Image (cartoon, coloured by chain):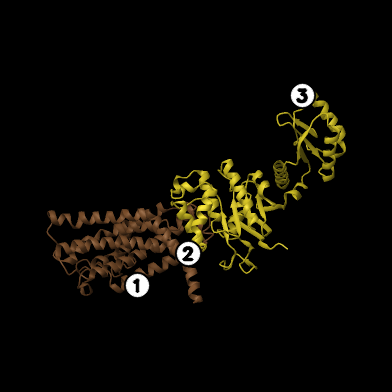
Amino acid sequence: MNSLNNFYYKIKPVFHTFIFEIRLQMKKFIIFPVATILLLFLNSYLPYILYTPLESSQAYFYEFGTIYFIIIIVLAVSIFFGGIICSEFKNKTGLEVLPLINRYKLLIGKYFANLILVIGIVAVHYLTMALFGYNFYGGPLLKTLLYSFGFAVLYVLALGSIVTFLSSIMPSITPVIVIMSGYVLILDNILSFLILGINSELEPLYSLGYLFTIITKIFFPDFSTMERRDTFTGGWLFPSIEGALALLSLYTVIFFIFSIILFKHREF
Amino acid sequence: MTETVLILENLYKRFGNLTAVNNVSLEVKRGEIIGFVGPNGAGKTTTLKLIAKLIKPNSGNIFILNKQGKLQNLQGNSKNLVEMGFLIDIPHFYNSNPYRLLKYIANLRNYPKEKLKQRIDDLLTVFNLTKWKYKKVKNFSKGMIQKLGFIVAIIHDPEIIILDEPQTGLDPNARIDVRRYIRSLQKKGKTIFVASHMLYEITEVCDKIALINQGSIIEFDTLDNLENLLRTKEIICELLEPIPIEKKDLIITKLIQRLKPYLEKNLDPSISTDPISYNSQKKSFTIYYNGMDLSRTNILQILVNDFKSDFTIDSFSKPRTSQLERLYTQIINDNAQ
């Protein structure tokens, strides 16, 4: 009972930070699901109603509906997680709370609050997609939707940790957003292309763009038997479940630990 | 014996080549109000940030009373320490409303849930922020932000309160409120640190003053004891009625003659060229005397008995603020040489 009480007192500041952060970010949170639904409507509903022939299967439909979702994920993660540490210093809000709360607890509370919000955005995307899929293809829905959602959550975790790490070394949120978006959406592709030119056998598991492809490919029920390399170019198409799991988990843990260490030592 | 609640021991903090805090040592007893006075960049805020654990010292220790009544090193596990509240620098808040902010801060420090709502309401009332309770902080004026910062520092009823320039941006009424509240906190046994440039505020509320310059504490004592360090001391003698202008010089000459044994003999010309001067607007004499308590008594007796026909005394006092100002200037200048 005593140890339970101790645990409760330890966890309380995390919980209060979590609730406070959720409320603070609520305005931003409302914008993203609206944008997601609107984009899905324009991309995966309206064209099929108006002129485009429907994809041959649910899996193709979902794959198409998820390809551009990386942009939303990267933006959402950058915006939600980008200020997690640096804003405490830049806006000097840390002067009010850091003397009162252990830095680890503040970071964990804020991290999980933003994580839940971004997962909420991802969930809205998948629910909308499932709804549209049901509308076009009827039931039952592919259970691979859930696998993809699971990987999307893991991807958010990994990106969240990387952005938190950037936030711990950057002066403000703007360079975090620019660097993260620029890297994942542009630099990562260039880098993968260059490395592929040097060694085409090396699977680009380091690439965040490459890791994202599992989210779009895992919709296919025959995913485990699908060819992972392009038969003509030899280029890598998507990672294995084990590879993606391992790398995304590694990114999550390593960058989060780095963030904690850097935050602990950052001074006003 | 009064309990020691905080000890700073040989604290050093360097930023590159700059030594911001240089061998600072200090002992503070429960219920004391300590004033931190020094010029810009003297190391006041850095010292407070060290106590707030916002930065780490390069060397030295900070000991704070724990809930078991023992002094405990701040750098260790701080969960058992007595509660501390902080107002450091100009406060900056998350874009929320005072109610949520205060609730969050109090919850972080486990303030009893059942008393929290009342506590928030009471403090917002004291500082005239009740009608702003649910308004976003981004719409607040500088003074309101400052008041909210003060409330944030005390919302969880801490034992030690650290206030960095608490009067900045406040209107006169709010200053009085803050000053009054600081005194009421002292009556409850709270220990308070106030760093300020506003010497008047410091003299009004502080029991002891730490004069800090270039990272070092030059003097740390009560104001009365610090005044003994002044080379020249003054008395302000306010009159009920102004003296006639044609009689002014005559009265001053007579005063100098009668008070000669008690006047400052080596008066610093940068302070005044005359040992006694008269300010007709304020209807007051400024008398630079030798600083002895007995002299002050004798001066008062002479003024009352020998100048009955010339003027009536309304007040006779040592001007604490100007004393501190002069002391501050004197010590800072001496230290710079």
Secondary structure type for disc 1? helix
Which residue is the extreme one toward the top?
A: B246
Residue with the mark numbered 2: A13
**Do the residues at pointers 3 and 2 share their chain?**
no
Q: The N terminus of chain B is located in which quarter?
A: bottom right
| Disc 3/disc 2 C-alpha distance (Å) | 70 Å
* Residue A116 occupies quadrant: bottom left
Give above or below for B268 relative to B108.
above
* Position in image of residue A21 (x %, y %): 42, 58
Chain letter matching colour brown: A
Residue with the mark numbered 3: B245
On screen, residue A176 versus residue A41, left or right, reads: right
* Position in image of residue A235 (x %, y %): 25, 66
Mark 1 or mark 2, earlier in chain: 2
**Do the residues at pointers 1 and 2 share their chain?**
yes
Secondary structure type for disc 3? helix
Chain B on-screen colour: yellow
Query: Which residue does the image show at 59% across and 46% down from the upper left?
Result: B177
Identify the amino acid type marked 1: Ala
Which residue is the extreme one toward the bottom?
A: A1
Asked whether the residues under the numbered discs 3 and 1 touch, taking CB atoms below 8 Å apart as contact, a structural biologist would say no
Chain under disc 3: B
Are there few (<14), some (14-19), or many (20+) residues within 10 Å of tag 2? many
* Position in image of residue B285 (x %, y %): 77, 33
| B312 vs B265, nearest the viewer | B312
| In front: label 3 or label 2 | 3
Chain under disc 1: A
Residue with the mark numbered 1: A246
* Position in image of residue B119 (x %, y %): 52, 56
| B193 vs A142, nearest the viewer | B193
Identify the amino acid type marked 3: Ile
